[in-house]
Amino acid sequence: MIRLPRRDFLAGAAALAALRPDWAESATPGLSTLPTLSGETIRLTIDHAPVRVDGKAGHAVAINGMMPGPLIRLREGQKVRLEVENRLKEDTSIHWHGLLVPFQMDGVPGVSFPGIRPGETFAYEFPIIQSGTYWYHSHSGLQEQMGHYAPIVIDPAGVDPVAFDREHVIVLSDYSFTHPHVLFQRLKSQSGVFNFQKQTVGGLLAGRDQTLAERREWAAMRMDPTDISDITGAAYKFLINGHGPNDNWTGLFKPGERVRLRFVNAAAQTIFNVRIPGLKLTMVASDGQHVRPVTVDEFQIGNAETYDVIVEPQADRAFTLVAEAVDRSGLARATLAPRPGMTAEVPPLRTRPLTTMRDMGMDMSGGGEAGGGVDHAAMGHAMPAAAPKAEPGMAAPKPRGSDVMGHSMAMMDASKAPQVKLGPGVQMIAPMPVDRTGEPGQGLESVGHRVLVYTDLIALEPNPDTRAPSRAMEIRLTGNMERFMWGFDGKKFADRPAPYTLTAGERVRITLVNDTMMTHPIHMHGHFFELVHGPVGHMPRKHTVNVLPGGKVTFDVTGEAGDWAFHCHMLYHMHAGMFQVFSVRPAPGAGA
């Protein structure tokens, strides 16, 4: 947590109860403590503020003078009034990410409320009907990228099913000293502008990465297999609780304790791969919802996801917490230690991943779409052998091959996705999308240890609605990476496509199909949905889900009345058009 000048810090303090529980004690003064607000009335101010990251001065849109803003700690069953004062010269807002609130309190300008004008104060009021790890952030422009985000912890009304001795909240984020609108314009003007990890002639001669034939075929399609992240470590510092890798945020523990780490990915544009060398990670909650404990060595956390993790360090030594950017262009780093001032070795960045045919929606396993395989002979191409099967999170390297690469995308159009047509905003349509929820994410297929996959997640508590869906929907995630155009079903939100519609109480099965070569973390406001796997009645509940390139994700959801934002949580993808609205209307005769 970066401490900033205290002008108006904790304005309205008489209405606040500031908490500093034992778990938040500082390992290094000014580093480990997360200022915490609680009570039935909480006041927040949004204003510009100076910050320092790894010793360099920068600028933030801050909450109560801090980046991240203060931790809000509430209890299930209480009511809360959050008074948000806007001291900016532009509109602002706060969305309570993952909280089930009346749609008028959801905080999305133009969808659920008008926004907060400069100089105005808006009061959000709602009951707290859940527990878990969540967060809050701006839904106005690109303010989230500039520091307008912070964590929320809601304690359960009863006994917490997760036993722990100490906890730390870990807010992951990305920060740039360049203004976000400049970053966006550079993305629009030049594809891969921040990718400094392109393939080289030296790599070709050394036999690394792709063969010459593969490179030619990718070049003919004007696609770059190293383009994993839009914005990379060339423009970003990767932060933990507002601190850069050199700042080394530190959290304390006593050997033998069960330490609960509440991870929040508040990054604008970065998916992180998280590990703590020397410690096993026991996952106990996902997106604030308890799951049956599963122990892994590493996990991938998409933008806006949260995970609760238990670690049990036994040794009297420090451990490095590593959050590596998915493209491995940089990392966020923190330390868990028994005493202040201790450090541990920081592992080097691993080799960056490459996009493959599977990421293009060309399934080489022979499975193809649900309901049958693909007739490879009919496509006129010899296919490479399928990769051998392996345990979850430890898959063998994905086959690259090259024979299908030059195949015309035009052949793979309307029959696969009749609602989508190739055009300026639709660069490709995945010909063989497959469910990839059993895969660990790009670059983690062969890391040599256990990586969490979505199919590992099983809900601890019974699902609240176990009815079979009454109908199904398919939504395609579309884009043009070269032009930095993004949308749903080939349409960007600026074109005002008709909203998706549900009826309150209706049970619907939705399948997201990713027709692009980038992972998209998709968030549905106002709802938890159940990923369709695992025991019936205990399917994992999520509010945000990563849809891997060329992959698909299926979930069941029960409509809640209101107008709800639905979007990719890559901030610049949403800003470019990957945003929609679910309009959930009351059932006929309801409430009349």
Image (cartoon, grey):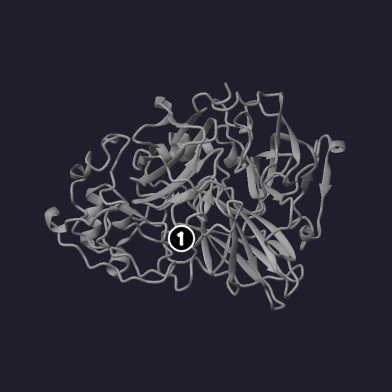
Q: Which residue is mark 1?
A: 455
Observer-nearest residue: 525 or 4? 525
Query: Which element carries disc 1, helix, strand or loop?
Result: helix
Residue 207, horizontal then vertical, whole percent: 29, 70
Determine whether, in the image, residue 511 is placed left or right of residue 183.
left
Q: Position of residue 306 (x, y in %)?
A: 58, 52
Residue at 41% x, 25% y is 496
In x, y percent, where is residue 396? 35, 70
Residue at image coords 29%, 68%? 387
Image x and y of residue 524, in percent: 51, 40
Q: 6 and 306: which one is in front?
A: 306
Q: Mark 1: which amino acid? A: Thr
In this picture, residue 161 sits left or right of residue 207: right
Q: Is residue 90 above or below residue 284?
A: above
Quarter-of-image position of residue 366: bottom left
Point out the residue furthest to the bottom here: 315
Q: Up-down: is 506 above or below 232? A: above
How many numbered marks, from 0 up? Answer: 1
